[in-house]
Image: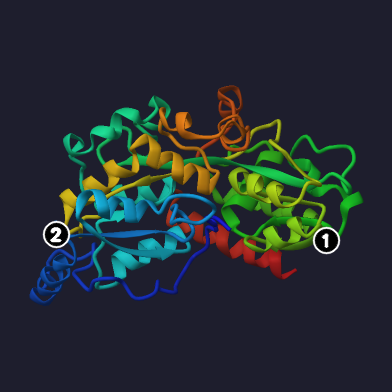
């Protein structure tokens, strides 16, 4: 399965890093770290680049795609040390609390805002990223980076619903279908606070992009009404549940829904008519980077149209690259799940970074709802 955008407070650090260096939250660097970096640089004729990415979030030769990292190494002579994380919070914790360094990270919009605010990112030299010209204007000057100093958008998508046509009639039109009492015991809901509460907030007439504690309280009331109707809260389990016709309807990410539909012909999708969350992840260089030019070379390579197309083909999430669709089959480039229309995107909202106090409260209240 592809990337899981579960937004939870993570206290567990990621697995061992490729290199042990000064952390991004640290002001200095260690001699041992530099020695490690010098040793590792021998791995490639032009050094290394240390990439920290979501799991299952880059084409690596699976599903009839190219291994884009192998292609990068072959073209540039730069060795890629590649490790993965599961949540934005795990990424943040790793960069700020561990003695590690990475050159390219790919956080989501609200985490980018937080990292910029805390001075954790380096400004990009776009002269080293000429393929930035292929980025759609919609995904330049992102709300989290309005001056386009720190980011090159990597991938984007929207939240939606997947349902079993043999179990759901009539076809759902909006998020209230997840509160349908006729489907009691067959409904799957996002198992992360931000996505679940955002849906509840929409149904309460609240803008979920930047919420308050009062907004959370209203969303909690809505989720409490839904709880008795659920089969379970689910993230990665949604694939088995829906592909195996074990549940009737679920909230999830549109690109992943496209992958589920490939596995079960009884499945269909709904882009909620009231709109949904527009999310995006972007390639950034953390301040602890030891290989900035190599990082920019990697970012530039990932925006070669044919490479961006390979990642889109694998992920089924939208690519911001304007020329990449020329390398995609019609069933992907014409898919409303991968590339929702401009009219639909106008209905969508983008998460902003909420205050830590509000975010912690959201987590606490969501756990209480789940425990009921």
Could you tell me which quadrant the C terminus lies in?
Answer: bottom right
**Which secondary structure, mark 1?**
helix
Q: Nearer the viewer, residue 372 or 19?
A: 19
Image point 15% across, 63% down: which residue? 27
Residue 208: percent from left, percent from top: 57, 42
Task: Tell me the quarter of the picture where residue 234 sits.
Answer: bottom right
Q: Nearer the viewer, residue 144 or 280?
A: 280
Q: Looking at the rendered structure, which numbered label has been put on residue 159? A: none
The residue beneath circle 1 is 228
Q: Looking at the picture, tell me which residue is in the foreground, 167 or 347.
A: 167
> Residue at horizontal 54%, vertical 53%?
63
Question: Seen from this angle, which residue lies furthest left?
Answer: 31
Mark 1 vs 2, N-terminal side:
2
Mark whose residue sits in front, 1 or 2: 2
Q: Is residue 45 above or below residue 129?
A: below
Quarter-of-image position of residue 286? bottom left
Q: Is residue 361 left or right of residue 183?
A: left
Quadrant where the N terminus is found in the figure: bottom right
- Residue in view at x 71 percent, y 44 percent: 161
Question: Where does label 2 land, which residue?
Answer: 45
Q: Position of residue 345 (x, y in %)?
A: 56, 29
- Element on which disc 2 rests: loop
Q: Is residue 128 left or right of residue 84?
A: left
Q: How far apart are the two marked residues, 1 and 2, measured between alpha carbons?
A: 59 Å
Q: Position of residue 159 (x, y in %)?
A: 61, 43
Labels 1 and 2 touching (C-beta < 8 A): no
Is residue 352 visible from the viewing direction of this image? Answer: no
> Dot 2 surroundings within 10 Å: few (below 14), some, or many (20 or more)?
few
State left or right for residue 51 relative to residue 349.
left
* Residue 256 visible in the current orientation: yes
Q: Is residue 233 above or below residue 202?
A: below
């Amino acid at each position: 399965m592809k990337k899981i955008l579960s937004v939870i407070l993570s206290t567990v650090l990621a697995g061992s890093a490729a290199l042990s260096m000064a952390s991004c939250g640290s002001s200095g660097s260690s001699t041992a770290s530099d020695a490690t970096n010098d040793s590792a640089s021998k791995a490639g004729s032009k050094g290394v680049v240390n990439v920290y990415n979501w799991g299952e979030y880059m084409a690596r030769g699976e599903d009839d795609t190219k291994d884009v990292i192998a292609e990068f190494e072959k073209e540039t002579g730069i060795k890629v040390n590649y490790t993965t994380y599961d949540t934005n919070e795990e990424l943040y914790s790793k960069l700020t609390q561990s003695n590690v360094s990475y050159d390219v990270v790919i956080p989501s919009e609200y985490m980018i805002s937080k990292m910029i605010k805390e001075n954790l990112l380096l400004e990009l030299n776009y002269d080293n990223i000429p393929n930035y010209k292929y980025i759609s204007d919609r995904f330049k000057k992102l709300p989290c980076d309005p001056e386009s100093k720190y980011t090159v958008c990597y991938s984007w998508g929207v939240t939606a619903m997947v349902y079993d046509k043999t179990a759901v009639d009539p076809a759902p039109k909006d998020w209230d279908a997840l509160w349908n009492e006729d489907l009691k015991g067959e409904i799957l809901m996002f198992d992360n606070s931000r996505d679940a509460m955002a849906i509840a907030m929409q149904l309460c007439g609240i803008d979920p992009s930047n919420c308050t504690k009062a907004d959370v309280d209203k969303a909690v009331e809505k989720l409490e009404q839904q709880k008795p109707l659920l089969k379970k809260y689910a993230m990665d389990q949604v694939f088995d549940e829906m592909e195996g016709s074990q549940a009737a309807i679920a909230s999830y990410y549109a690109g992943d829904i496209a992958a589920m539909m490939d596995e079960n012909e009884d499945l269909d999708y709904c882009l909620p008519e009231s709109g949904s969350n527009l999310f995006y992840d972007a390639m950034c260089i953390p301040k602890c980077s030891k290989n900035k030019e190599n990082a920019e070379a990697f970012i530039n390579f990932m925006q070669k149209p044919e490479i961006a197309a390979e990642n889109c083909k694998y992920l089924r999430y939208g690519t911001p690259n304007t020329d990449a669709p020329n390398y995609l089959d019609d069933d992907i480039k014409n898919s409303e799940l991968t590339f929702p229309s401009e009219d639909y995107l106008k209905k969508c909202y983008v998460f902003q970074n909420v205050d830590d106090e509000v975010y912690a409260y959201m987590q606490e209240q969501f756990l209480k709802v789940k425990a009921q």
